[in-house]
Image: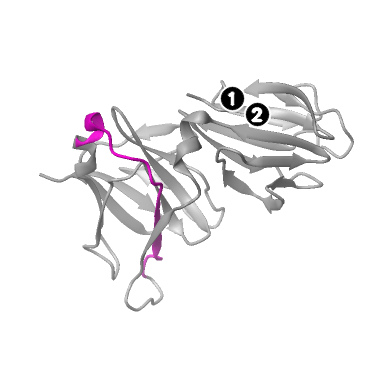
Amino acid sequence: MPGKLEYRFNNNKLGEFPLAKEVMTIGRADDNDIRIDNLAVSAHHAKLLNIFDDSFLEDLNSTNGTYVNGKAIDKHPLRHGDIITIGKHELRYTNQSKAYLGEAEKTILIRPKAESPGHPEPVVMTHGDAPITPELRDLSKARLQILNGRSAGRELALVKESVKLGKSGSEIVQINRRPDGHFIVCIDAPDDQLPPRVNGKDIGAGAIKLRNHDIIEINQLKIEYYIAS
């Protein structure tokens, strides 16, 4: 179920915006999906990427910045209860399907024993804490295995709802578990790196369903997705 944004100004609720489109923009110009008519708001201030019931917020090089819970962001995966501040206006993100996840996360850092030029960079894998339901039990056999670099052979079982891959503090992709499989989506594509790919094809702006033995590429690092027997 997609989330929604509650639009507030001076603690007064002015309206709600269901996140029903895959891409939505926020800004002062008339062509935005969410229009905020205020000089402190840029013409095209921020963008929302909505994939299934996950939403990601991106600042569009706005003049006054985009803030989530009081902190300036470039790109940010939204969580139930997040407060987005644009100018003096607030947009509260709500998504009841995500409310039970809480704030706790476990982070596993997979790092080469010795980093040196020419080797792929380390990967951070961050899991949400969703319970495993009976219909999702088979998907818990899915794993990620690093194929190259000094961490080659390292594995991680995908037993939780989501995992983010990338360097600590700058995750590149997120893998979400759905009833019909695992889907990968790009949440950041640094300009100085190759775009993330699956089987040699750019992931792009949409979500891609992962299949057994798919190869995920992040910069020079290769990771295999497979279902353990």
Residue 128: x percent and y percent?
41, 47
Compared to 220, does 55 lie above or below? above
Residue 19: numbered disc: 1
Horizontal side of 205 relative to 216 (left or right) equals right
Q: Are marks 1 and 2 in contact (CB under 8 Å)?
A: yes
Instruction: State which quadrant residue 124 falls in.
Output: bottom left
Nearer the N terminus, badge 1 or badge 2?
A: 2
Residue 5: numbered disc: 2
Residue drawn at (49%, 45%) of the image: 102
Three-letter amino acid code of the residue under disc 2:
Leu
Relative depth, front residue between 140 and 111: 140
Q: Which residues are magenta?
A: 119-137
Q: Is residue 127 magenta?
A: yes
Compared to 8, does 184 lie above or below? below
Examine the rendering and report whether any part of residue 125 can be seen.
Answer: yes
- Regarding mark 2 in the picture, which secondary structure is present there? strand
Residue drawn at (31%, 55%) of the image: 222
Residue 16: x percent and y percent?
69, 22
Residue 211: x percent and y percent?
24, 36
